[in-house]
Amino acid sequence: MKRTLVCCVLFFSILLLPGVRAGAEGVKRGWEVELSKLSFDFNSTEVKNATEYKDFPQARLNADSQTAIRGFLDASADYYAHRYLWSNELILDYGRTKIRPVDGETLTNESADQILFTTGYTQRLWNIPNFLGGFELGPFANLGYETEFTKPEDAARKKVLRATAGVKLFEGTYLKSLFAAVVGERDYTYSPTSNKLAWEAGLKIEQPVREGVVAKYEVFFRDYLSESQSNQTDLDYEFSADARLEVQLYKNLYLAPFVSFYTAQAKYFGKRGENLYIGVSLSFSHLFKAADEISE
């Protein structure tokens, strides 16, 4: 009962915000096709005759040779209609590190491996132009599929069909996305397949610092409530956070120092896994087709 009352209060509070127009038209119309980000990180260290210098107090002479590479692509094709938004997004993320020790076998480690395609419908129910820089608000439903480029050596390849439904704030000047949703998953990773129920929430914010410099923040949380089949790899929850400062180098070319954090808790044992990634990314973006701007 208390949760219901809180939701009702929040719902009617939104309607009382300055400038809220129930059923107001969005300001965009038509297709918008964009390569949001194509980034590439690469570094290589090649050490020769390291064995002969292994007793020297000079790391640059006796270090292990190694190569690290990571690529990321985020592309979208969205259609803005009178009362709704049809969105389509493709995310490709892959990172690999190869270490060639002075003595021993070559080691290969994947730091990222994800293929995610999502298509969804969002009702453009309200337009709120005079609060927090303006944004739109409405219910949404998404259908997505997630898998991996390569099968892990000691695990199965991830294959998950995911349906999501909830409410979100979107298309804001600063508030790019804020949502809460119920999630249903069909996990094909193992046989027999497993049906899972979860809830999730996410936040994306962009803050201009000065001309050519933008700070971007992203937070995501998913909490699994139940599953039809139990596996040792089932998660209780997962959380990720990303902060980056994009600096424009030339036109659509950006340099971005960033911090990325991911953590997850297994459902059937106590230790929580973590991944902290700190680096600098060179990225490129391009708007192939912009939606038409409609003045209200």
Image (cartoon, rainbow, N blue to C red):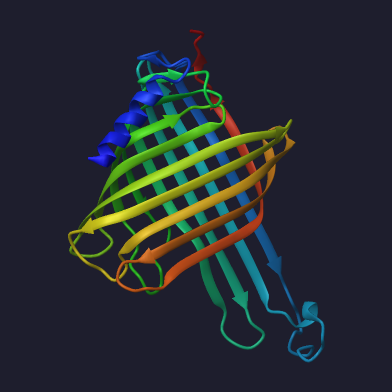
Image quadrant of residue 79?
top left
Q: For this rendering, which residue is in front, 50 or 220?
A: 220
Q: Is residue 46 visible?
A: yes
Q: Using the image, determine if residue 150 lies above or below residue 48.
A: above
Q: Using the image, determine if residue 142 lies above or below residue 150.
A: above
- Count the marks: 0
Q: Which residue is drawn at 35% across and 14% down?
A: 23
Residue that protrudes farthest toward the right in the picture: 57
Q: Where in the figure is residue 94, as x and y percent of width and height?
A: 51, 56
Q: Where in the figure is residue 40, as x and y percent of width and height?
A: 62, 51
Q: Where in the figure is residue 37, as x and y percent of width and height?
A: 57, 41
Q: Using the image, determine if residue 294 lies above or below residue 188.
A: above
Q: Where in the figure is residue 231, as x and y percent of width and height?
A: 25, 68
Q: Can residue 141 be seen in this view?
A: no
Relative horizontal placement of residue 191, taking residue 209 as reference (left or right)? left
Relative horizontal placement of residue 222, taking residue 290 as reference (left or right)? left
The N terminus is located in which quarter? top left
